Amino acid sequence: MRNLGSAKWLLSALAGALLLAACGSPSNSTPSTPPVSESMSVEEARAASNDLELQGRAPEQQVVFDFSGKVEEGPSKDTVLAGKLTLELKPVGGGHFVFMGALTGTNLNVPAKGVLTRGGRIYIFFEVDKANNLLIIGTGKREAGGVFKGPFVGPAPGDRSSWTATPVSGPTPMPTPTPQKLAYNFSGLVEDGPAQGTKLEGRLNLEVRLKEGYGRLEGKLLLANGSEIPVKGALAGDKKVFVIFDLGKGGRIVGEGDIQTDKRIQGPFILVQQENGRASLSKGSWTATPIP
């Protein structure tokens, strides 16, 4: 087993960053986010909002609506759903957005997520009971004055309703979150591939800009000999972390990790090497333990 005492070996041994797109994520499966379009299905819209939430896209704009809906048919007939609907928009290209937010009111706080297309179509999913996968699924279209109207179904089978959302404020830029400084003892081990047995250890200092659990992070991995490796990434809720270690000259280590109950982060990583003009792939695992 070889101990990696400096970044020099990494800088010379690792290149081929362009291969990362072809290699996929560290778990060897690239998230397949359906393209956002005017004609996408409800299933595609839900998958898009879920995938982009997981990838930690930071919201950039906020819109607030007066929301009202009433169940007109089904087991929940005459049930009224009303309150302030606050949505935080994440641009995904082409003038399209995904969003996250909540419908709030008296004794009401229902998480929401969905997709807003360039042409004004909206797909919105209210998580009434996430544990039991109970949803209210709404679709609609932007009308004059920025008002959205449309039908929704759920949460009970057979429930059919209509809803209206009238803009109160926005879109306004999201405030810049106050950064949080975190420190970890980092340890990574290459377990398979040409670099098998290589270790990477040091202190990982991160600055996290957080908004309701989702945000961006950047910092440095400090090795024992004083070398520094820049790090960037994304935090997705209290579940996932995505990190990229920039080794210079195109070299990258890309990792993803699961956040444990004790705040440790564990997961796999990909390491790409260039040897004699050919690229080779190594895989490993890493752990980051919080420093009090």
Image: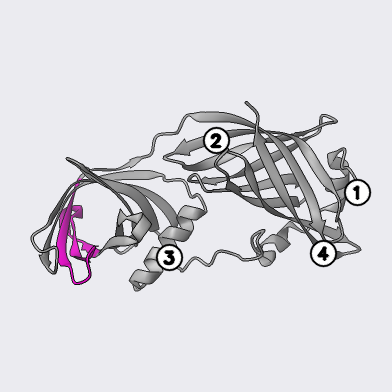
Q: Is residue 75 left or right of residue 262?
A: left
Q: What separation in Å lies between label 4 and label 2 (alpha carbons)? A: 33 Å
Q: Residue at x 69, y 60 (%)?
A: 20
Assess whether mark 3 and mark 2 are in contact (beta carbons under 8 angstroms): no
Q: Amino acid at mark 2?
A: Val
Furthest-top residue in this view: 292
Colour scheme of this structure image? one colour
- Sequence order check, earlier mark of 1 and 2: 1
User: Residue under circle 2?
Assistant: 208
- Sequence order check, earlier mark of 4 and 2: 2
Where does the C terminus fall, quadrant-wise?
top right
User: Would you say residue 123 is visible in this rendering?
Assistant: no
Count residues near mark 4 (Cα–Cα under 10 Å), then give few for <14, some for 14-19, many for 20+. Answer: some
The front one of 191 and 87 is 191
Q: Is residue 290 left or right of residue 174?
A: right
- Sequence order check, earlier mark of 4 and 3: 3
Magenta-drawn stretch, dominant element (helix, strand or loop): strand
User: Residue under circle 1?
Assistant: 1
